[in-house]
Image: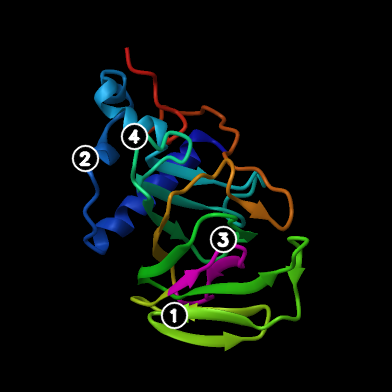
C-alpha cells in the first residue's frame, strides 16, 4: 500500500469514530514526531502493539481484502509477568466491499460488536480435529445472551448494537452487508496475539508492504521507535 492510502484510511476511520462519539486514549493521537520523544513509560504501547493498524492480509488490494483497526488495550502472553491483563479491546472499521478472510483462534475467545453504521455479516463454521473447515456440523452461536444453532456457513447478521461471541476453533469471516454502509466494530476478547493465535483457512499475510509516497499521519503499531 502507498503511505497516502494508509493515511487516508486512518483519517476515514477517525471520522467514523468522531461521528459515533467514541473517545480514544491519548496515545492514539500522538504524531510521528511526538513518538520520537516518548520514553520507556510507553513501553506497554510498544510491546503489546497498541494503537493504529492496517491490514490487507498481504493481498495488495486493501479495498477488497482488509480493514483498519485500533488496539486500545491488550495483555501479552509472552510477557505475562510484566503485563498481567488477560483481555484486549479493539475498534475495527470495515467498508462495503472489504472482507476479512476465514480464520479461527486457538486461544482467544472474542465478542464482535457492531458499534454503529451499517450491518456486518459474520459467516461461521466449526473446525474439524484436523483444523480444516467442518462444512456439515451445525454451529452453536451466542448472540447477546441468546444461544441458537445455525447450519454450517450461515452468515449471522449484526445490526448496530448487536454482538456475537466467537469461541476458540470457530471459523469465521466477515464483511459488510451491501447497501448498509461502513461499520464501526468493537472487539472485546482475551489477550490478542496476531503472531501466534490466528489459523487462516488459506495462507495470508498480515502487515502491508508500504510505499512511502508521503509522510505518515500516524505511526502504525509495528512502527514505533524504541525508547532511548
The residue labelled by disc 1 is: 143
Answer few, some or many: residues within 10 Å of disc 3's Cα (few below 14, many 20 plus, some between 14 and 19): many
The answer for how far apart the CA atoms under marks 2 and 3 are is 28 Å
Which numbered disc flags the more N-terminal residue, 1 or 3?
A: 3
The residue labelled by disc 3 is: 98
Closest to the camera, between mark 4 and mark 3, is 4
Answer few, some or many: residues within 10 Å of disc 4's Cα (few below 14, many 20 plus, some between 14 and 19): some
The residue labelled by disc 2 is: 26
User: Could you tell me which quadrant the C terminus lies in?
Assistant: top left
Q: Name above or below for residue 57 compared with residue 188.
A: above
SS for dot 3? loop
Answer few, some or many: residues within 10 Å of disc 1's Cα (few below 14, many 20 plus, some between 14 and 19): some
**Residue placed most toward the observer, 30 or 71:** 71
Q: Position of residue 186 (x, y in %)?
A: 38, 62
Q: Position of residue 159 (x, y in %)?
A: 41, 79
Q: Position of residue 215 (x, y in %)?
A: 41, 27
Q: Position of residue 44 (x, y in %)?
A: 33, 33
Which numbered disc flags the more N-terminal residue, 2 or 1?
A: 2
Which numbered disc flags the more N-terminal residue, 4 or 3?
A: 4
The residue labelled by disc 4 is: 45
**Which color scheme did the rendering employ for the protein?**
rainbow
The answer for how far apart the CA atoms under marks 4 and 3 are is 28 Å
Amino acid at each position: 500500500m502507498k503511505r497516502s492510502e494508509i493515511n487516508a484510511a486512518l483519517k476515514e476511520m477517525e471520522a467514523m469514530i468522531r461521528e459515533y462519539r467514541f473517545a480514544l486514549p491519548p496515545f492514539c493521537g500522538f504524531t510521528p514526531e511526538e513518538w520520537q520523544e516518548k520514553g520507556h513509560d510507553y513501553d506497554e504501547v510498544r510491546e503489546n502493539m497498541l494503537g493504529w493498524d492496517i491490514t490487507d492480509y498481504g493481498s495488495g488490494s486493501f479495498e477488497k481484502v482488509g480493514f483498519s483497526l485500533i488496539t486500545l488495550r491488550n495483555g501479552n502472553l509472552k510477557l505475562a509477568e510484566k503485563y498481567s491483563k488477560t483481555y484486549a479491546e479493539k475498534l475495527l472499521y470495515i467498508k462495503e466491499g472489504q472482507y476479512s478472510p476465514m480464520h479461527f483462534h486457538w486461544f482467544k475467545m472474542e465478542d464482535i460488536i457492531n458499534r454503529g453504521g451499517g450491518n456486518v455479516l459474520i459467516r461461521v463454521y466449526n473446525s474439524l480435529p484436523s483444523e480444516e473447515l467442518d462444512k456439515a456440523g451445525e454451529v452453536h452461536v451466542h448472540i447477546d445472551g441468546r444461544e441458537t444453532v445455525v447450519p454450517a456457513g450461515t452468515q449471522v447478521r449484526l445490526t448496530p448494537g448487536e454482538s456475537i461471541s466467537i469461541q476458540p476453533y470457530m471459523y469465521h469471516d466477515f464483511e459488510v452487508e451491501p447497501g448498509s454502509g461502513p461499520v464501526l466494530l468493537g472487539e472485546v476478547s482475551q489477550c490478542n496475539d496476531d503472531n501466534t493465535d490466528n489459523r487462516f483457512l488459506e495462507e495470508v499475510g498480515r502487515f502491508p508492504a508500504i510505499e512511502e509516497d508521503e509522510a505518515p499521519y500516524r505511526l502504525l503499531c509495528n512502527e514505533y521507535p524504541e525508547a532511548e
